[in-house]
Image (tube, rainbow, N blue to C red):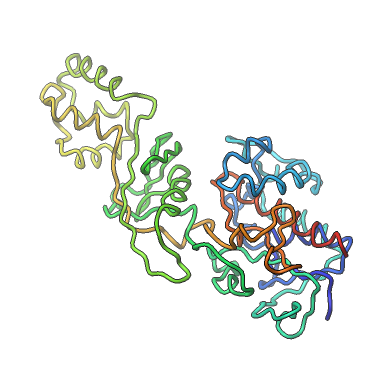
Amino acid sequence: MEYDIAIIGGGPAGIMAAIASGKTSNVILLEKNPSLGKKLLLTGGGRCNITNNKPPKKLLTFFDEKNFLKHSFFTFTNEDLYSLFDFDFIEEDNNRIFPESEKSIDVLNGLKKHLKDVKILYNYEVKKITGKFIINDEIKAKKIIIATGGVTYPQTGCSIDNYFLVDEEKTKIKYGLAPLVTKDDLSQIAGITLNSVECIYKKSKVKGDVLISHVGLTGPGIIDLSNKISKDLDYDILTDDYNIDCEISIDLLPDLSREDIKNKFDKEFQEKGKTQIKNYLKQFLTNNFIEFFLNKVNIVADTQLNRINKKEKNRLIENLKRFTFEIIDFNKDLAKITIGGIDLKNINPKSMESKLTPNLYFAGEILDLDGPTGGYNLKIAFSTGYLAGLSAGKSE
């Protein structure tokens, strides 16, 4: 079997590459699973946060590799993406875009309608690619687009082995958008949400909700901060055992300064002197979190305000602004994306073609590209996938 283009991986990037190239070239899409888009169906909690609706220039500011992504984002815009579907989308907070039905299967089916000219081979695992692009000793292709994704969610077909299908330089592979495992046992307060707090790691700050789980911390604020932590640590899950030993803090009252809180305490500790501290803190903290907070601060919950001394008051203020957790691991099973991948220095950003191997293209999560939560990573997949497919199909 011989084809103009073989696309490896039937996720968002691979599907979009096939859509872009299928009308002009003889294309085969090789998918490891019995169906396409297995990971796409999981995104947005099954609702599919398909993209982020910020204007392209502003959108690019959310990525470390904005210069690399610029051409792909302007080549395949959000408007181009929406035009592929015969249904409407809704915009939610922070410019997140979902299908009006809020069902990811509708997005997948909408994309599949554009694959009528593409040969799709299901349950086909690519185990090796040899010279002049012979796949598994049986499929020949003039050009190849690799869109196999990262290493997270292995149940969707992602695998470490995909990074070694071709001999290209890779950056260190790490977990991204992952919940954090804490040294402290948080099972007693699992399920509590800390609303609109600020999560801090060194100089990085992310504002958002934090959900306390049985093993640690999750929620939008933590998930986005985990990328900062992961990039800062020196490890590679392809080769290394690793240990995480770092500290994050949470500003429980980001809209109030320390001085604001001090002034409020000075006034109200006198006016409400007989009020117990556990009741007073209800104006700041969710009820079920207060006892845990006071235990960490080492103040008895029943203590009246007029019996709290200056040192204890300062300790309260400091912990309201900087409540710390020791982090010992990522919750790897729940990591949403992979950080790292094929080194961008060897990829042409105007075509997604390898600078080392002519006619070899890459798209999506296998590249060293990542963004925060909120539709940014699907935006990468769709735009780089489309550009790779468009570029590969142009000269056919």
Above or below residue 280? Residue 289 is below
Q: Where is the C terminus found, in terms of image quarters?
A: bottom right
Residue drawn at 69 percent across, 58 percent down: 13
Question: In the shown orientation, is residue 289 left or right of residue 255?
Answer: left
User: Toward which corner of the image does residue 274 lie, by quadrant?
Assistant: top left
Residue drawn at 82 percent across, 68 percent down: 27
Residue drawn at 70 percent across, 83 percent down: 136
Counting from the top left corner in percent of width and height, residue 73 is at 71, 45
Residue drawn at 22 percent across, 14 percent down: 267
Counting from the top left corner in percent of width and height, residue 45 is at 57, 51
Total labels drawn? 0
Above or below residue 91? Residue 122 is below
Question: In the shown orientation, is residue 259 left or right of residue 363?
Answer: left
Question: In the shown orientation, is residue 270 left or right of residue 54?
Answer: left
Q: Where is the N terminus found, in terms of image quarters?
A: bottom right
Question: In the shown orientation, is residue 128 left or right of residue 215?
Answer: right
Counting from the top left corner in percent of width and height, residue 122 is at 73, 74
In-front residue for pair 266/280: 266
User: Toward which corner of the image does residue 197 lie, by quadrant?
Assistant: top left
In-front residue for pair 349/195: 349
Above or below residue 122? Residue 77 is above
In-front residue for pair 246/132: 132
Extreme bottom residue here? 137
